[in-house]
Amino acid sequence: MNSTATNTTLHVVLGASGAVGSALMGELARQGLPARAVSRTRPTALPAGTDWLAADLSSAPSVERAVQGAGVVYLAAQPAYTRWALDFPPILDAVIGGVGRVGARLVFADNLYSYGPVTTPLREDSPERPQSRKGQVRLALARTLLDAHRAGVLPVTIGRASDFYGPGVHGSLVGAPFFRAIVAGKRPPWIERSDQLHSFSFIDDVARGLVTLAQHGPAFGEVWHLPAAEALTATGFAALIAQEAQTAPPRPRALSGLPLRALALFSPLIRELADVQYQVAAPFTVDGTRFTSTFGGQPTPHRSAIRQTLAWLRAGSLEPSPAEEVAGSPL
Ligand SMILES: NC(=O)c1ccc[n+]([C@@H]2O[C@H](COP(=O)([O-])OP(=O)(O)OC[C@H]3O[C@@H](n4cnc5c(N)ncnc54)[C@H](OP(=O)(O)O)[C@@H]3O)[C@@H](O)[C@H]2O)c1
């Protein structure tokens, strides 16, 4: 493996119509790096001159076509939130096989579910003890990827982030529905406790972090926590958004206890959220210092990131997207 990607290396983004996929396409364009977008549906916005290819990643031949010519591949695709256990493993197998065969390196956009409940800020060496079904799936994905790296099938690096917010983010606790409620002077949706410290990851920082990992040989074979600005409570985060939106500070409308369990009986999505409620019932924060001390850079301050998110909403995303209408917000 080359230790650095050159300016002519082709970067292929799998899941380019999603939140981190779109942000990755933007970051690659900003850095002037050749990129190809891959998803089943056409991304709503692509940087000028970008190539888009339709592919279903659960099909190995489709993946192989999609990654032809790539030097770096980002796995930023995910199946529907309620179908990870069924649909993620075949996607991962097809991606490992396809990327390995073209001799590219793989960057996986991961979350923090594999650790399970914690009492201290999450570091890369925190024990992975998932107690949720979704956490077990994520641990298995990461292990499969790192095993493939160790077996020499392909170079893999994993960048983990907390809940996303920012332009293009719909499916997240603090995605567009959370912001929209505050802009409309309403209480934003939340689950469990809104008074516990939580990390919120700005989507452009996540994309920049993943591109940084792709460009550093020593990043491979390892897990990295992508830096996020200071942890806040959901109430504190909502107040900051309200200040920037010039609306009254709202108290998040937190669903918990019996109402949460009752709704979970009827809604598969709420059931999945109840499975990982430990992340919002107690402090859940990420420590990105290993990344910043190795590669430099600092996360965007929340105020600036919130301003960019509000500008995106006002430019056309104040109404739910068709995908949100279909999938429902995470709450
Ligand atoms: N959302 C968060 O707050 C958050 C936080 C930390 C980490 N993460 C992780 O980051 C990764 C990306 O998340 P995201 O929120 O950016 O995802 P997302 O917005 O839900 O987008 C998912 C992408 O995957 C594509 N996709 C799904 N199934 C596919 C298939 N069979 N073939 C081809 N493309 C497929 C979708 O496109 P089409 O439907 O057009 O194919 C879409 O582009 C995930 O692993 C996620 O768990 C998310």
Image: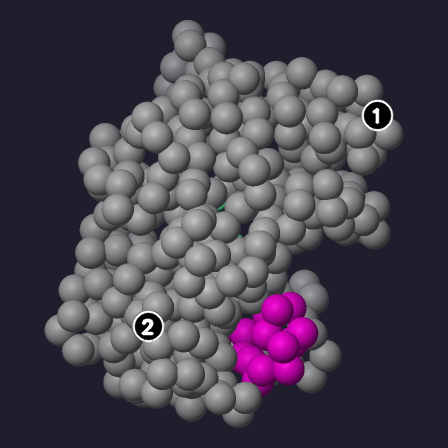
**Quadrant of res 115:** top left
Q: Residue furthest top?
A: 258
Q: Amino acid at mark 2?
A: Pro
Q: Amino acid at mark 1?
A: Thr
Along the horizontal axis of the image, is 253 left or right of 6?
A: right
Q: Residue at x 46, y 14 (%)?
A: 256
Tell me where residue 99 appears, x and y as whole percent: 32, 78
What residue range appears in magenta?
25-39
Label 2: how many Cα within 10 Å (few below 14, some 14–19, many 20+) = few
First of labels 1, 2 by sequence position: 2
Q: Answer yes or no: is residue 151 visible.
A: yes
Tell me where residue 118 appears, x and y as whole percent: 31, 29
Quarter that holds the N terminus: bottom left
Along the horizontal axis of the image, is 37 left or right of 215?
A: right
Tell me where residue 14 appears, x and y as whole percent: 46, 69
Q: Residue furthest front?
A: 293
Circle 2 residue? 218
Q: Residue at x 81, y 35 (%)?
A: 244
